[in-house]
Image (cartoon, helix red, strand yellow):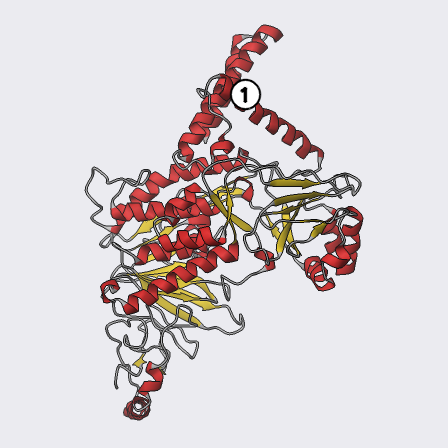
């Protein structure tokens, strides 16, 4: 049977009648197939039938060849796929290294670009649970601020940086902000000017995903045109695929089984064989869950023999548990009564006239570059707020609109927002800000030869509320650290390392975990205390917390000025400084904290007459807290 037409699939793990798989085509038509497949014939009649079918298809080969592989397909990959929905397994290794990336968000796509390029040259299969990661979704209409930390990675790919600067709204520091009072009789203040600083870029989530997909597609097209780029690995993105399991093979490779998510009632599974599996699938990572909580009935193997290190440590910040959903404002809407036109690249905070703990609300609009794009308006409150109470009581779009009209008499909602949008907003479940969490385990490798393994990046390692603006930047920093570890470079600086390059994948991933884990730990501390009160929640505990937090930041700023920079400013104010690691940032903050505790203890001793033991206990408590972390 001609291999250029189709292949006969037989999996040693499953028994079923042989069939002709027309979805897997030769390397001249699509992505490279494994070197060979075996045919398991049940009878001579089956063989005769398959030969007849193969002969008829051979005459139709031009039609098959005409179907060129695109970036997005519904099947295929490094392994093999079945049009019947039966799970199948590739049994032969490919000539190039293969990687399966689970998660098609920005961090997963960035990992695909990195691993497919020099000097790694992995063939990539990327599986994404959603139907289309790049499509605009009002439930995920949040924006990223790609700051200098994240741009360490983007600037290594000139096309990505070019698209980011072209489509992102530039931000050079605090400012470019307008606070709109709720009372229509109060004038709207002038926009606060932006401060000078290193450029960051606001970009919608779907816009970031789209530009990464375009960069991948352009790279693949260049690979097909330019023979000198033939070493660059192929990248195939498969939507509607949820990761089910990982299974080590006898040769050390990993079988990744995925479930089709188009129709949950249909059991359509695919399997892929990989040398490297990357978990980039978010805070509820299926890859991490598999490593941390193996099935009690499953046989222990090298993938699941270290579950404790993949279990998350969680702490609540003042922002954890807040709920958010998005109301879509039209572009360039007017602010009455003077009908001031809004600017797409200006940040707006629109206050309500309500002041109670359960009815005060503030609408937040972040910058977008496209002047014709809708303005996603964030509604962020505690779960016991009236907005959520309306939903629990079955409130309709009309009910929600009436509530907002009362809370924001300045805005003309009748002309701004259509009834369909109010109904969508009323029924939307929204999202809940997570606790600050991380896991110390970031990788596991095969003991066979050390050249196969699993590694985590992005929110699969660390997740936290969005108030410090470091989510995507920390994820891209993970990808950059992984790239440097594989190259044998210094992970912190990116310079050539004095030690020899890693001899195996295991050495590289162990270095990645050893260096990156303390950095992630410090990142989570920053997330807990950095800026959790910026959402101005009206409850008494939030108001008190915001006052104390503001006093703390102001005190550190004052001490920083008085000491001519000797005492560092508040950590959150240096969070975008790429020259300072999160570890160094928090270490500086800790030194200041201990100094302040010590001064407070001495003052209390002098004024209050407390003894030295109590004063020492205050300092010891601060030291214990820092050391415990």
Viewer-nearest residue: 67 or 607: 67
Q: Position of residue 400 (x, y in %)?
A: 76, 55
Quadrant in the rendering for residue 185? top right
Q: Does the image show residue 25?
A: yes
Residue 593 lies, with reference to residue 198, above or below; the image says above
Viewer-nearest residue: 170 or 475: 170
Name the residue rendered at 55%, 56% in the picture. Answer: 370
Name the residue rendered at 28%, 61% in the picture. Answer: 232
Residue 11 lies, with reference to residue 498, above or below; the image says below
Left or right: 624, with 317 as reference point: left
Viewer-nearest residue: 512 or 536: 536
Residue bearing mark 1: 558
Name the residue rendered at 44%, 19% in the picture. Answer: 566
Quadrant in the rendering for residue 627? top left
Could you tell me which quadrant the N terminus lies in?
A: bottom left
Left or right: 393, with 49 as reference point: right
Could you tell me which quadrant the C terminus lies in?
A: top left
Q: Position of residue 467 (x, y in %)?
A: 56, 41
């Amino acid at each position: 049977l001609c291999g250029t037409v189709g292949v006969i699939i037989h999996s040693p793990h499953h028994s079923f009648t042989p069939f002709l798989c027309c979805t897997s085509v030769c390397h001249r038509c699509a992505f490279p197939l494994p070197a060979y497949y075996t045919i398991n014939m049940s009878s001579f009649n089956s063989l005769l039938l398959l030969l007849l079918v193969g002969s008829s298809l051979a005459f139709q080969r031009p039609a098959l060849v005409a179907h060129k592989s695109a970036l997005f397909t519904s099947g295929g990959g490094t392994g093999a796929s079945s049009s019947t929905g039966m799970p199948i397994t590739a049994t032969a290794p490919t000539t190039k290294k293969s990687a399966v990336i689970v998660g098609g968000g920005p961090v997963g796509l960035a990992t695909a670009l990195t691993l497919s390029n020099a000097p790694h040259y992995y063939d990539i299969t990327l599986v994404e649970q959603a139907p289309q990661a790049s499509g605009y979704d009002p439930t995920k209409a949040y924006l990223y601020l790609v700051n200098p930390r994240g741009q360490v990675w983007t600037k290594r790919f000139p096309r990505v940086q070019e698209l980011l600067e072209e489509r992102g709204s530039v931000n050079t520091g605090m400012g470019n902000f307008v606070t709109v009072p709720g009372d229509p009789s109060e004038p709207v203040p002038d926009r606060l000017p932006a401060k000078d600083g290193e450029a960051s870029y606001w970009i919608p989530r779907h816009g970031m995903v789209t530009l990464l997909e375009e960069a991948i597609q352009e790279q693949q097209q260049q690979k097909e045109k330019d023979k000198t780029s033939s070493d660059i690995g192929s990248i195939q993105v498969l939507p509607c695929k949820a990761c089910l399991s990982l299974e080590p093979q006898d040769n050390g490779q990993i079988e990744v089984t995925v479930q089709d998510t188009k129709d949950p009632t249909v059991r359509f599974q695919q399997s892929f064989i990989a040398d490297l599996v990357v978990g980039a699938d978010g805070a509820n990572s299926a890859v991490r869950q598999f490593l941390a909580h193996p099935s009690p009935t499953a046989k222990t193997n090298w993938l699941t023999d270290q579950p404790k290190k993949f279990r998350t440590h969680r702490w609540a910040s003042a922002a954890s548990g807040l709920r958010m959903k998005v109301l879509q404002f039209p572009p360039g809407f007017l602010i009455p009564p003077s009908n001031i036109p809004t600017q797409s690249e200006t940040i707006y905070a629109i206050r309500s006239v309500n002041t109670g703990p359960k009815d005060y609300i503030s609408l937040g609009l972040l910058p977008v570059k496209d002047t014709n794009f809708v303005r996603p308006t964030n509604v962020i409150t505690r779960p016991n707020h009236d907005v959520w109470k309306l939903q629990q009581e079955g409130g309709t779009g009309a009910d929600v609109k009436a509530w907002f009209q009362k809370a924001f008499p300045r805005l003309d909602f009748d002309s701004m927002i259509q009834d369909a949008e109010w109904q969508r907003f009323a029924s939307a479940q929204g999202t809940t800000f997570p606790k600050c969490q991380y896991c110390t385990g970031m990788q596991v490798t095969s003991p066979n030869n050390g050249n196969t393994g699993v590694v985590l990046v992005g929110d699969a390692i660390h997740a936290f509320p969005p108030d410090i603006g470091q989510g995507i930047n920390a994820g891209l920093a993970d990808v950059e650290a992984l790239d440097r570890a594989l190259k044998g470079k210094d992970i912190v600086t990116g310079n050539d390392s004095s030690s020899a390059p890693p001899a195996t994948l295991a050495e590289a991933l162990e270095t990645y975990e050893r260096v990156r884990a303390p950095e992630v730990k410090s990142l989570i501390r920053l997330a807990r205390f950095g800026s959790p009160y910026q959402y101005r929640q009206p409850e008494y505990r939030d108001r008190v917390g915001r006052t104390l937090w503001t006093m703390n930041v102001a005190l550190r700023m004052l001490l920083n000025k008085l000491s001519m920079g000797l005492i560092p400013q508040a950590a959150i104010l240096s969070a975008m400084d790429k020259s300072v690691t999160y570890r160094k940032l928090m270490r500086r903050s800790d030194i200041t904290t201990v100094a302040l505790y010590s001064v407070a203890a001495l003052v209390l001793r002098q004024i209050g007459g407390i003894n030295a033991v109590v004063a020492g206990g205050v300092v010891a408590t601060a030291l214990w807290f820092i050391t415990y972390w």
